[in-house]
Amino acid sequence: MKNEPEKKQKIGSALVVGGGIGGMQASLDLAEAGIKVYLVDSKPSIGGVMSQLDKTFPTNDCAMCTIAPRLVSIGRHKDISVLTLSEVEKIEGEPGNFIATVRCRARFVDEDRCTGCGTCVANCPVRFIPQPLDGYADVQLSPETKTLVDNIIAEHRFRQGPLMPILQSINVAFNYFPEDVMKYVSRQLEIPLTSILRVASFYNAFSLKPRGKHIINVCMGTTCYVRGGERLMDRFGELLNVKPEETTPDMLFTLKSVRCIGCCGLAPAVMIGEAVYGKLAVKDIQGIIKKYRGNGHAPHDH
């Protein structure tokens, strides 16, 4: 009997294109069989469309609960290499003996040191064009404003972490953050404007837009909401002819919604400046507004 020619042994790795639920499961099955797997996906991360879903048909199972164990297993498996932001350009050879050319797009971060903090996204030079400090050298402030801001900066400049107290003092002085003042502070402290704006836009007590003399904070926390906080907000908006987060044309009132003012025992509660109005009824609102319009200053706390 004539000996049959020996078959070529198929060795090497497997290439899985697409990191959806099917690609992830195929990669795990191949890797468990002892085959080195390269999982390629054009997106920044694997998971596919399923990661965007809430429930899956027809079992109504949680989509993330379905893919999360597979994501963890793939990340821990020694025989699976994930190539994201990558595309297969060409494949040469035959089944069992081929060479694939994969183009990997640059991430501009060191993946080995990435912790997923998101700082790179906030400072991305593609999305946000960095503004040099020299660009603010020509900022012109009025003599009164410049003197005020210089005094604030001088008071806090040599403190550890001076930015927050400086912003707090500017907020008290102007009731918001004027653009020219922010650029001037950026120049004087040698802190990028993006870093200052990140702090200024984070806290609810700060504003980048002009606000009214009296800020009406209507509590919408759980206790205040169930006891009529929404009705109070509607009544304030009706009498002032503004919506939440808007300011009256005379710059006297700004209407805001806040999550909690720490007065659950007085719900529903409203805070105007430093004055707290607890167990407030809709019928009382018109009188409160009239007091602020007439006196021009804050009445006593309630």
Image (tube, grey):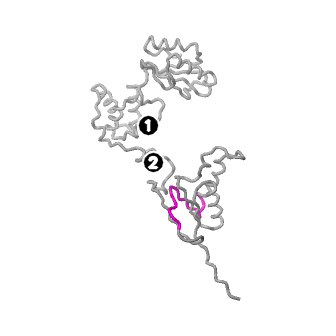
Residue pictured at 60% horizontal, 71% vertical: 96
Numbered tag placed on residue 199 in the rendering: 1
When the figure is inspected, residue 297 is found, relative to residue 29, above or below; the finding is: above
Q: Picture coordinates of residue 4 (x, y %)? A: 67, 84
Residue pictured at 32% horizontal, 33% vertical: 154
The region drawn magenta spans: 75-91
Name the residue tied to disc 2: 120
Foreground residue among 295 and 86 = 86
Using residue 71 as the reference point, say whether residue 253 is left or right of it.
left
Foreground residue among 184 and 74 = 74
Q: Nearer the viewer, mark 2 or mark 1?
A: 2
- The quarter of the picture where residue 225 lies is top right
Q: Picture coordinates of residue 123 (x, y %)? A: 42, 45
Foreground residue among 259 and 65 = 65
Check disc 1 and report its element: helix, strand or loop.
Answer: helix
Residue pictured at 65% horizontal, 62% vertical: 29
Residue type of the residue flagged with mark 1: Val
Q: Picture coordinates of residue 141 (x, y %)? A: 29, 29
Foreground residue among 19 and 122 = 19
